[in-house]
Amino acid sequence: FDSFGPVLGDNHHQKGVFFKGGLYFATPKPFSVVIFDLGSGRWKKPIGGLPSQLTFVRLVSDEKGKLYLVGGVGNNGISRSIKLWELGGDGNWVEVQSLPNLMCKKFVVVCYHNYEHVYCFWHEGMICICCYTWPEILYYLVSRRTWHWLPRCPSLPLKCRCGFK
């Protein structure tokens, strides 16, 4: 399909997330979520309004048909909290969880407010949040509604800043 450039621009940090027959993308500021319908090959109108004061947005979908939004909330491009929302049946985002304060501080230090290095994916009941410059993974275990850090691989040197790929 040729129509991605005009809609997404230079937003190569957010990959499409498959959900209900389409690819969902978060657009750069001003943030919105747009849908590319794979059946018709056309763009659909953005879905419901996003939460306010977002500093970055990433999308994740699970195998059960749920769409999640991971986002930083703050001012002037600095996240003061990281939150998780789920897309409700009415097309509105419903807050699910907030990252605990100490974990949020570590995450913000890890990515240095450079959110282009942040990416998310779904893996076996977990929403994984990674940074290309840090060898640990922050994850949210959906079944238990808890946040955790998956430590760096022990075979990496202690001062490794290579990130997780």
Image: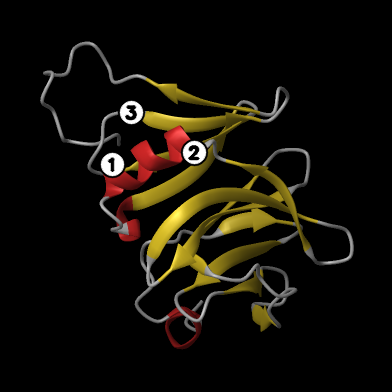
Q: Is residue 56 visible?
A: no
Say few, some or many: other residues with alpha carbon within 10 Å of mark 1 (under 14 / 14 to 19 / 20 or more).
many
Task: Decide which of 144, 4 is in the foreground and name it.
Answer: 144
Say few, some or many: other residues with alpha carbon within 10 Å of mark 2 (under 14 / 14 to 19 / 20 or more).
few
Colour convention? secondary structure
| Residue drawn 78% across the image and 39% down it | 64
Viewer-nearest of labels 2 and 1? 2
Say few, some or many: other residues with alpha carbon within 10 Å of mark 3 (under 14 / 14 to 19 / 20 or more).
many
State the CA–CA distance, disc 2 to disc 1.
14 Å
Q: Determine the secondary structure under disc 3.
A: loop
Q: Earlier in the sequence, mark 3 or mark 2?
A: 2
Whether residue 47 sits left or right of residue 130 in the image: it is: right
State the CA–CA distance, disc 3 to disc 2.
18 Å
Q: Earlier in the sequence, mark 2 or mark 1?
A: 2
Q: Determine the secondary structure under disc 2.
A: helix
Task: Decide which of 60, 141 is in the foreground and name it.
Answer: 141
| Residue drawn 48% across the image and 45% down it | 120
Q: Position of residue 94 (x, y in %)?
A: 77, 55
Q: Which mark is residue 56?
A: none
Viewer-nearest of labels 3 and 1? 1
Q: Is residue 120 visible?
A: yes
Provide the residue designation for mark 3: 136
Q: Determine the secondary structure under disc 1.
A: helix
CB under 8 Å between callouts 3 and 1?
yes
Q: Position of residue 88 (x, y in %)?
A: 83, 57
The three-letter code of the residue at mark 2 reads Asn
Query: Quick check: 103 above or below 35?
Result: above
Provide the residue designation for mark 2: 101
Provide the residue designation for mark 1: 110
Viewer-nearest of labels 3 and 2? 2
Q: Earlier in the sequence, mark 3 or mark 1?
A: 1
The three-letter code of the residue at mark 1 reads Val
